[in-house]
Image: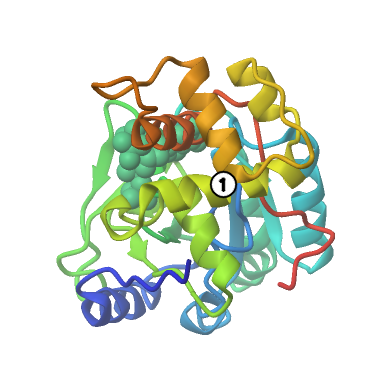
Amino acid sequence: MNIQWYPGHMTKAKRMMAENIALVDIVIELLDARIPFSSKNPEIERLAKDKPRIVVLNKSDISDQAENDAWLEHFRGGGLAAVCVDSTSGKGLPQIADEARRLMRPKRERQQARGRVFAPIRAMIAGIPNVGKSTLINKLVGKPAAKTADRPGVTRSKQWIRIVKDFELLDTPGLLWPKFDDPSVGLNLAFTGAINDQIVDVIELSLLLIETLRSRAPSAIPSRYKISVADEDTPLTVLENIAAAREFRLKGAALNMERAAITLIDEFRAARLGRITLESAEVTKC
Ligand code: G4P
């Protein structure tokens, strides 16, 4: 399956992001912790124009704990600030402002030495569709959100949200689009739901997911669906066994393969098959 998909308004999104980046001190690069490599757009480095970046591994509640640690080490080893968060519960979110302060400290010390009063740190969240940008912003904002006024001449028509006293967030996230140079990237994006399901064949996708899970998490399918999976079973046999185990049948008693495929994909995305990371930090190319 070779997936090629681009969200609409790509040029507009790119332009908006380039404009907004000029207004911030820091860029928060949001990745999906289940697919840190596939959800990362290498272009962000250029777009961020040398501004400090914080890599935020979101959805870390549904990715593998040991892999989360390995990815943090990977990014930190490459000189980037990196944290793991769960934007749904809010776990880990305070680390973002902490890291922003740490990254901005040298600049602030220089400003202080010159007797300047420093303004709050301003940040923008950027990431591919569905990675959790809105969820993260909403969780950080909480209630009631203190919306700050524009700084005349600098940030006309931009809305900043004060998260804590010294840290503000642009309320419009930067939209990046996935990179499809490597076919496995497209697949990982489809498995995790980052790509519109309408463009993929659901049965074909489920068969590829079965193959992937076989190597990444061999016990996930057998334990979720209470079926045995032998080495020689084809992905199609496994899908048939899932359909049979769940009693998914069409009129006339034939197995309802489409329903089995949709169920498997949905349950994988909701982490009902366990916390599974599809890409290892050790073998990544980034
Ligand atoms: P976006 O703005 O980047 O496009 O993403 P958005 O916040 O809309 O989040 C996409 C989906 O991911 C949402 O699911 C959201 O609840 C879920 N999500 C975001 N952050 C986390 C996280 O840290 N952990 C988990 N487990 N889920 C997270 P949804 O509303 O159910 O959308 P969908 O799944 O129906 O597409």
Q: Quadrant of the C terminus?
A: bottom right
Residue 151 sits above or below residue 154 on the image: above
Q: Is residue 134 visible?
A: no
Q: Is residue 268 visible?
A: yes
Residue 213 at what x, y percent from top left? 67, 42
Looking at the image, which residue sits at the far front? 252
Measured as percent of width and height from the top left, residue 97 is found at 56, 46
Extreme-left residue of the structure: 157
Could you tell me residue 147's position as x and y percent?
24, 43
Kindly identify the residue that appears in the image at 72 percent across and 30 percent down.
229
- Left or right of 31 in this view: 279: right
- Taking 275 as reference, is 193 above or below it? below
Q: Is mark 1 within 8 Å of ligand 1?
A: no
Q: Nearer the viewer, residue 168 or 95?
A: 95
Residue for point 60% across, 53% down: 35
Hey, which quadrant is residue 93 in on the image?
top right
* Number of marks: 1
Q: Is residue 224 above or below residue 277?
A: above
- View quadrant of ligand 1: top left
Q: Is residue 46 above or below residue 79?
A: below
Crowding near pointer 1: few (<14 within 10 Å), some, many (20+)? many
Quick check: 277 left or right of 173? right
- State the residue position of label 1: 209
Q: Amino acid at mark 1?
A: Leu
Q: Measuring 60% from the left and 59% from the top, which residue is drawn there?
A: 54
Depth check, front residue: 24 or 57: 57
Image coordinates of residue 228 in percent, x first then y, are: 71, 23
Q: Residue at x 46, y 25 (%)?
A: 243
Secondary structure state at the residue bearing disc 1: helix
Nearest the viewer among 84 and 40 is: 40
Q: How is the image coloured?
A: rainbow
